[in-house]
């Protein structure tokens, strides 16, 4: 090779950086520029802190009742007022963050694990297995999601954990289809053809090439799905099919206090606001991750 | 000599990105005379497409913006013309065809709907005449079954046919200038020959001036009378096609011509221009081609040469020394 | 003369198109329709043709990335369509491929080092340290630097990526390299760099190339012999000198005359073919080229021409030379 | 076209069968003795025996399923445990109420959502764009039952503008013809009643429309942005076409396919969301019917309600599929 080519080749390259560091820096640079995403991440972090340090942040215990101060409006003592049992709403919302985040994260992780597994199998091996798995997804997706959760909970019995399981099951096909279509796309990419041309086997192709390249959209979808999982859990709680009183799940709290809305609107206002805020947080973060991780999905 | 119809004077177009202002076109000059075919040639990233979009007022904005210079159409500066004025010019006076015939036609409207649109916009013809005009246009660009084609959708046509339809659309209002941005790059070589042949024929018959933008020196040599060579946002050489190919005076032009494999004889080894095109804005001083130039001199690193010459202009100190 | 390195005989690839409610096969696309040629050790066979002529499919069938419908492929005398898995693995080591799109053919999430190392891992060559050394050696060989191993493909220009692709192909010391449009995505000034590199490597390692491209000038430059394809068939194949200087088949003639020559004084008389290449699902009867052929005769629409050897050893498939 | 429709319809068969299996499984997946679960621990052995027989629970599973399937196909959805009424005859009035509510909500969502999305894309990064997208973001993040409660509080309790409960005033009864009261009142010429029905519809329809509106607006925006960047829009500009027509005529037709898909999928959300909305607003639709059944563990009603709603959802998506061809000539009906 001519010396000159080497010089030229080296010249227009960017500064030297470690591989992982450079990938992370690229991601961070893209994410950081996205102000809404930062706000979203901030909100999510805020609720995580609330949940983790609930015992230290909440001024009162989950079920500290005081009949003398029923349905009191927000004050210096009770920032967000009290409910019909005289419990401090702020404290209950803080503890509620634990429940909502737990449902959100665990349900989505469950969906991701099973969805990815089924999606990869369907997408990579195709043919009969694909038909069976895809049909299974079709059937699950043919139900409006909240109805299917209701059906599952009505079998398992109403509780927060069963709501979690139901939400996880309902979302399996969401990730399954996503991963399957991603696998189908990646499978046709030329670098996979290149991998096959050097004689690489299926397992190595799946784990070294297809999965890493399918990961970004799963993370994005996962973040957005935490938002819907929290909403669905609250909805089930509201219908009496999720968390049961006196658990401070936000939807359950709304259900219990809806009859007091005329006299004590704060009992309804604040748990709802908490749901909106945390869901907005995950949605913003998901949109931001999409822009940063997967430029092709960008607007 | 015929009259100048379009003149680009000191045009500067920049893109404003997160990394700051990136100059894509950096003070270029050239003019197009009535009825001639001017070639603009250069490799990817040289700014040739940005130039054409600047003329049409179709720069994606933001981030693109014309930051200096003039674009004179029949003496009128249209570089900062109002959108309503540009709409009147586009399609009617200055038309454009693009590189990708596959994506440049709207997939959900028929050929007829797309073909008659410009005519409808610029000359108010009754519906009957519209249709016969459309048919006439399709025949003019050499498409068979014109009447049926009007009712078909783009996906039912081959790439070559689509590019003919694009040309028909562009020619529908008898424009004075046709800008063709890599019109044959996406086509096979035998289809390319058909399209170039068609464009030369239309140029002869309608006297529409054509600006042919391409990276393919072969296409330029076969079709154009005058050539502008661009490198990194600047014009580096301009002149008659024979002068450029037989006596290239800029080392970049020379290198480009020499690095093409010859169809008629086999060379042992190809000439190469070392390195690759610099990122826009990455070279702050001196000649932009200096890092890749075989004839580089000391002053090339510090001073930027000007484009000088009469009919054959060049931006290189080598020839300015001699002169 | 010794045994050819690769011998392809009557290779075919048909794709059925299914339609209707019950998915019956309604028509067949003949992507490759009976292609035969040989490649000798150390030479470069160029395959040219327009898009859809089946040249890439042919290349991929030799790699067995696409399973042929019919025909045989012999590599070093072994029929690779009928050998055991372990034998096929050996063949895969000896035959490597370079791809057209330097952006799509490198995994964006792998470092350059691991991209080049991967074929060695797959074929169990060397230990970790040896492989790393080999990667550095290969990078230098293709005109990059050892420190590039830690970077990701998106940090490189198109020409540099193509060099990475070449390094990957060379990693397991193959005998035959199939290069599918390796320079068509590159700018002229970079294209010549890559072509020179390919020639240098060929000399150095006595490589054999099958060079698939649509650019006739590029193919002439790099090839010893050239085959011209049209609608899934080879219409003419011979050494490149005689093919370019004195084309026999009317399609070859038209193809050559259509190439714009970068010389304003050489405005050759162009043969401008009418119409488009027909769909490979409905090739014309008789000679597939007859409906566009400027010198078509009656027989051309009736009988398929067969490959004939001319006096100088070249092969042409045209009724003109019956 | 016909053969395509038939083919798509045939492809629905396994999905619909799968749905019946899942719905069928609801009762049989209940751990322990379903009859005991349904009737509660205080049930007499006789009652358990009767229920077992009436549900056919003493038969082998596959026999039970085929009996169930046969019943559904012949229109028998079973009887309610709660009050022994025939579900099939009870379900239509409820379904009609839900369809009326969902349809109005969908019209709001489509009209508001598509226009907001188009304008946001056209005037990207304008004040309108930012405002619309922030509202849309909050919209998709909103628990609709909470929004419903707030609406009731603001517009019924505080402002007393609109009724908060039911389809009609308690004292008025609409003569049911189709059970779609908007139509029934007009057919009867009862314009005062029509107005009353409209007033009852407003709050629940807005609550139900919120999420779909927001999703359609976001989808329209991103789909339009994609299209507006395309080469053929550049071609249209190069012809000198006015931006308004480029957006509303050229780009919209291209952008419509993904929007249509989202609209189809949103009907599922609407029908599912109906259960929450109807609970809040005391809207006597199928959602409330199922909600009440849940409280009483009335499994046959839960089963049938879920089956009917899901069936409608599947059919809506089937129709959406067929509609693609109207907007995209590239889709061949083979």
Image: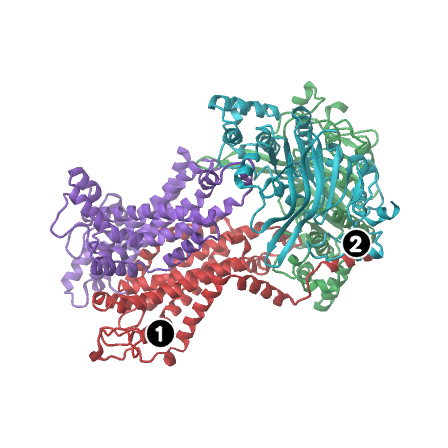
Chain colours: A red, B cyan, C green, D purple
Whether residue B108 is visible, yes or no, is yes
Q: Indicate the chain on which mark 2 is placed.
A: B
Q: Position of residue C17 (x, y in %)?
A: 53, 36
Q: Nearer the viewer, residue C80 or D235?
A: D235
Secondary element at tag 2? helix
Q: Of helix, strand and loop, which one carries label 1?
A: helix
Residue A163: x %, y % from top left: 33, 64
The percent coordinates of residue A270 (x first, y second) are 31, 68
Q: Is residue D197 left or right of residue C238?
A: left
Q: Is residue B302 above or below residue B158?
A: below
- Mark 2 to mark 1 CA distance (whole Å): 65 Å
In this view, which residue lies farthest toward the top? C298
In the rendered view, tell whether residue B196 sits above or below residue D299.
above
Q: Is residue B285 above or below residue C210?
A: below
Residue D58 visible here: no
Percent x, y for residue B64?
59, 49
C312 horizontally vs D124: left or right: right
Reading the image, the residue beneath label 2 is B290
Q: How many marks?
A: 2
* Viewer-side residue, C37 vs B65: B65
Q: Which residue is mark 1?
A: A94
- Residue extending farthest to the left is D171
- Whether tag 2 and tag 1 are in contact, CB under 8 A, the answer is no
Quadrant of the image occupied by residue A203: bottom right
Labels 2, 1: front one: 2
Q: Tag on residue C198?
A: none
């Amino acid at each position: 090779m001519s010396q000159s080519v080497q010089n030229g080749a080296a010249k227009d390259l960017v500064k030297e950086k470690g591989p992982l560091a450079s990938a992370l820096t690229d991601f961070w640079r893209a994410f950081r520029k996205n102000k809404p995403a930062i706000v979203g991440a901030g909100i999510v972090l805020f609720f995580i802190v609330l949940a983790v340090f609930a015992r230290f942040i909440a001024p009162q215990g989950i079920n500290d009742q005081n009949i003398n101060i029923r349905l009191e409006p927000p004050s210096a003592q009770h920032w967000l007022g009290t409910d019909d049992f005289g419990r401090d709403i702020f404290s209950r919302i803080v503890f509620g963050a634990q429940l909502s985040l737990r449902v959100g994260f665990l349900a989505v992780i469950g969906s991701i694990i099973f969805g990815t597994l089924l999606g990869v199998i369907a997408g990579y091996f195709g043919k009969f297995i694909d038909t069976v798995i895809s049909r299974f997804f079709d059937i699950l997706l043919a139900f409006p999601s909240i109805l299917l959760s209701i059906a599952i909970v009505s079998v398992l019995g109403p509780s927060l954990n069963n709501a979690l399981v139901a939400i996880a099951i309902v979302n399996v096909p969401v990730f399954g289809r996503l991963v399957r279509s991603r696998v189908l796309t990646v499978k046709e990419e030329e670098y996979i053809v290149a991998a096959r041309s050097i004689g690489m086997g299926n397992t190595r192709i799946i784990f070294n090439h297809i999965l890493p390249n399918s990961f970004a959209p799963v993370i994005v979808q996962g973040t957005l799905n935490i938002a819907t999982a929290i909403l669905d859990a609250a909805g089930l709680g509201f219908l009496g099919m999720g968390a049961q009183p006196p658990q401070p799940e936000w939807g359950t709290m709304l259900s219990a206090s809806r009859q007091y809305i005329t006299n004590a609107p704060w009992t309804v206002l604040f748990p709802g606001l908490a749901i909106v805020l945390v869901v907005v947080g995950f949605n913003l973060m998901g949109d931001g991750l999409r822009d940063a991780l997967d430029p092709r999905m960008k607007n | 000599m015929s009259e100048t119809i379009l003149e680009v004077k000191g045009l500067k177009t920049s893109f404003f990105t997160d990394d700051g202002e990136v100059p894509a076109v950096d003070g270029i000059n050239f003019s197009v005379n009535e009825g001639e075919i001017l070639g603009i040639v250069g490799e990817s990233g040289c700014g040739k497409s940005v130039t054409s979009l600047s003329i049409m007022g179709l720069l994606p904005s933001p981030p693109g913006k014309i930051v200096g210079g003039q674009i004179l159409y029949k003496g009128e500066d249209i570089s900062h013309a109002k959108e309503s004025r540009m709409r009147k010019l586009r399609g009617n006076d200055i038309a454009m065809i693009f590189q990708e015939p596959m994506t440049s036609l709207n997939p959900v409207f028929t050929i007829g709907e797309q073909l008659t649109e410009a005519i409808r916009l610029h000359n108010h013809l009754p519906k009957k005449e519209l249709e016969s005009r459309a048919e006439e246009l399709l025949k003019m660009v050499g498409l068979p079954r014109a009447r049926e084609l009007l009712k078909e959708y783009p996906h039912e046509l081959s790439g070559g046919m689509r590019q003919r339809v694009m040309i028909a659309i562009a020619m529908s209002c008898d424009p004075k200038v046709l800008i063709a941005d890599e019109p044959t790059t996406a086509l096979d070589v035998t289809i390319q020959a058909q399209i170039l042949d068609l464009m030369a024929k239309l140029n002869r018959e309608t006297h529409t001036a054509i600006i042919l933008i391409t990276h393919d020196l072969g296409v330029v040599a076969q079709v154009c009378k005058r050539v502008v060579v661009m490198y990194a946002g600047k014009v580096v050489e301009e002149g008659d096609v024979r002068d450029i190919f037989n006596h290239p005076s800029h080392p970049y032009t020379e290198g480009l011509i020499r690095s093409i494999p010859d169809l008629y004889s086999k060379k042992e080894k190809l000439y190469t221009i070392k390195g690759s095109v610099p990122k826009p804005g990455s070279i702050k001083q001196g000649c932009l081609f200096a890092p890749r130039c075989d004839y580089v001199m000391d002053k090339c690193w510090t001073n930027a040469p000007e484009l000088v010459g009469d009919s054959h202009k060049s931006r290189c100190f080598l020839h300015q020394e001699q002169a | 003369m010794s045994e050819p390195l690769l011998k392809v005989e009557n290779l075919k690839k048909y794709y059925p198109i299914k339609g209707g409610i019950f998915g019956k096969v309604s028509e067949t696309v003949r992507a490759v329709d009976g292609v035969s040629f040989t490649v000798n050790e150390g030479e470069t066979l160029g395959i040219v043709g327009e898009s859809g002529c089946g040249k890439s499919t042919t290349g991929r069938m030799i790699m067995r990335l696409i399973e042929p419908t019919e025909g045989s492929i012999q590599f070093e005398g072994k029929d690779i369509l009928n050998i055991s898995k372990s034998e096929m693995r050996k063949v895969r080591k000896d035959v490597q491929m370079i791809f057209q799109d330097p952006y799509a053919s490198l995994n964006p999430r792998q470092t350059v080092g691991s991209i080049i190392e991967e074929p060695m891992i797959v074929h169990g060559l060397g230990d970790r340290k040896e492989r790393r050394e080999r990667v550095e050696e290969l990078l230098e060989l293709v005109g990059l630097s050892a420190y590039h191993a830690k970077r990701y493909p998106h940090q490189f220009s198109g020409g540099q990526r193509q060099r990475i692709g070449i390094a990957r192909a060379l990693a397991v010391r193959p005998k035959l390299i199939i290069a599918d449009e390796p320079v068509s995505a590159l700018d002229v000034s970079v294209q010549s760099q890559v072509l020179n590199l390919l020639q240098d490597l060929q000399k150095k390692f006595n490589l054999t190339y099958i060079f698939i491209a649509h650019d006739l000038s590029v193919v002439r430059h790099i090839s010893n012999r050239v085959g011209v394809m049209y609608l899934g068939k080879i219409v003419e194949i011979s050494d490149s000198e005689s093919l370019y200087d004195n084309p026999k088949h009317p399609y070859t003639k038209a193809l050559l005359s259509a190439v714009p020559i970068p010389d304003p004084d050489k405005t050759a008389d162009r043969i401008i073919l009418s119409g488009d290449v027909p769909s490979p699902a409905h090739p014309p009867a008789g000679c597939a080229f007859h409906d566009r052929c400027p010198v078509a005769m009656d027989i051309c629409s009736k009988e398929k021409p067969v490959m004939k050897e001319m006096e100088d050893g070249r092969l042409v498939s045209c009724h003109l030379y019956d | 076209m016909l053969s395509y429709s038939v083919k798509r319809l045939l492809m629905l068969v396994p999905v619909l069968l799968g749905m019946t299996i899942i719905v069928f499984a609801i009762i049989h997946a209940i751990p322990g003795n379903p009859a005991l679960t349904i009737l509660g621990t205080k049930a007499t052995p006789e009652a358990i025996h009767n229920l077992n027989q009436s549900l056919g629970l003493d038969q082998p599973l596959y026999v039970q399923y085929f009996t169930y399937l046969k019943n559904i196909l012949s229109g028998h959805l079973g009887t309610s445990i709660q009050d022994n009424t025939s579900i099939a005859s009870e379900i239509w009035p409820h379904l009609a109420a839900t369809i009326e509510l969902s349809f109005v909500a969908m019209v709001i969502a489509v009209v508001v959502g598509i226009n907001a999305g188009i304008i946001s894309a056209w005037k990207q990064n304008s004040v309108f764009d930012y405002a619309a997208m922030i509202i849309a973001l909050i919209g998709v993040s909103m628990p609709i039952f909470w929004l419903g409660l707030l609406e009731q509080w603001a517009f019924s309790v505080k402002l007393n503008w609109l009724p908060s409960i039911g389809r009609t005033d308690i004292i008025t009864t609409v003569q049911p013809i189709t059970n779609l009261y908007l139509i029934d009142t007009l057919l009867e010429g009862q314009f005062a009643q029509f107005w009353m029905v409209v007033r009852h519809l407003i709050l629940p329809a807005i609550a139900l429309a919120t999420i779909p509106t927001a999703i359609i607006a976001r989808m329209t925006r991103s789909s339009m942005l994609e299209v507006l960047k395309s080469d053929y829009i550049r071609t249209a500009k190069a012809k000198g076409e006015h931006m308004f027509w480029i957006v509303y005529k050229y780009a919209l037709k291209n952008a419509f396919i993904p929007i249509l898909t989202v609209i189809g999928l949103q009907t599922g959300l609407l029908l599912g969301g109906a259960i929450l909305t109807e609970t809040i607003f005391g809207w006597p639709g199928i959602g409330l019917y199922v909600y009440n059944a849940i409280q009483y563990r009335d499994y046959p009603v839960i089963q049938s309600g879920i089956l009917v709603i899901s069936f409608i959802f599947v059919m809506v998506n089937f129709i959406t599929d067929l509609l693609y061809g109207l907007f995209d000539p590239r889709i061949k009906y083979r």
